[in-house]
Structures are given as structure tokens and as C-alpha cells.
Amino acid sequence: QVRLVESGGGLVQPGGSLRLSCSVSLSIRNFYAVGWFRRFPGNQLELVAALTTGIGSEYPDSVKGRFTISTDNASNTLYLQMNNLKPEDTAVYYCLVKVDYGGTYPVPLHEYDYWGRGTPVTVSS
């Protein structure tokens, strides 16, 4: 069982920045992939950042150039730096991990194994 706890969400004005954190109960090095997804107010889901071991990071066009995923292996923490935020980025953000190596690349959302309870982000003036 892997536990993930997100933090760092909140209210921010358009054009502002936030950095989300995700504390992971096991070593991040154990996982094939880590990432972030978001759930919009209408419950639509979108994978917004992924980091796959030995390959690199991936982002959808909606956030490319604005969002950056990173890890701190020493503290088993996953980050999502979000810049130039827009009202359409308003959502609940979740971190997630895929344990087993291999499978489809890029890893689709349904192949991840564990995720946290989320942290809400509201972009509004």
C-alpha cells in the first residue's frame, strides 16, 4: 500500500503561480512512473504531468510550458510547479504513482495504481 498526501493548493489570481507538493510513503525510486492529474468541477479528469523512469516527463498541450513536474528522492516528495495559471486550471489536483515497470507509454491515467485525496486549486480574480 502506498500513501500519498497532497498539499499546496489554494486561491490564486490569473497569471499567478502555485507549487503543489505530494508526500509519498515509499521511495519514489521504486516506481515506474509518477504524475499529477486533475478533476474539473464537472468531474472530467486530465493527466497534467507525468515522469516516467528512464524516459522523461510528459505534459498535455493544455499545460505545456506552464507546469513542471519534479521529485526530491531524498524526501520522497513529488512537486508540481504551476505558472501563469488560468481560470480553466481550476480543479482538484491529485498526485499518483504507477508501481510496476513496463506497459503502455506514455502511461495512461487508468494504469496508475495509487493516488492521494487531492488538493483544490482555484484560479480567480
Image (spheres, rainbow, N blue to C red):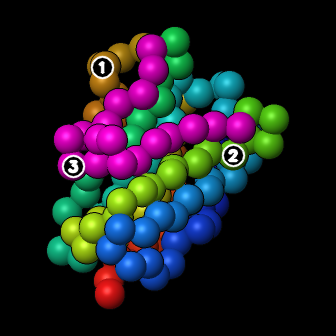
Quadrant of the image containing the N terminus: top right
- Image coordinates of residue 71 in percent, x first then y, are 63, 37
Q: Secondary structure at mark 2?
A: strand
Q: Amino acid at mark 3?
A: Ser
Q: Residue at x 62, y 56 (%)?
A: 21
Please tell me how crowded label 3 is: few (under 14), some (14-19), or many (20+) other residues with Cα within 10 Å: few
Which sits in the foreground, 96 or 56?
56
Which sits in the foreground, 83 or 47?
83
Q: CA distance from mark 1 to mark 3?
A: 22 Å
Nearest to N terminus: mark 1 or mark 3: 3
Q: Residue at x 67, y 33 (%)?
A: 28
- Image coordinates of residue 92 in percent, x first then y, are 39, 69
Q: Amino acid at mark 1?
A: Thr
Magenta segment boundaries in residue numbering: 55-72
Q: Secondary structure at mark 1?
A: loop
Q: Amino acid at mark 2?
A: Thr
Nearest to N terminus: mark 1 or mark 2: 2
Q: Quadrant of residue 55?
A: top left
Nearest to N terminus: mark 3 or mark 2: 3
Residue beneath disc 3? 62
Residue beneath disc 2? 77
Residue beneath disc 1? 104
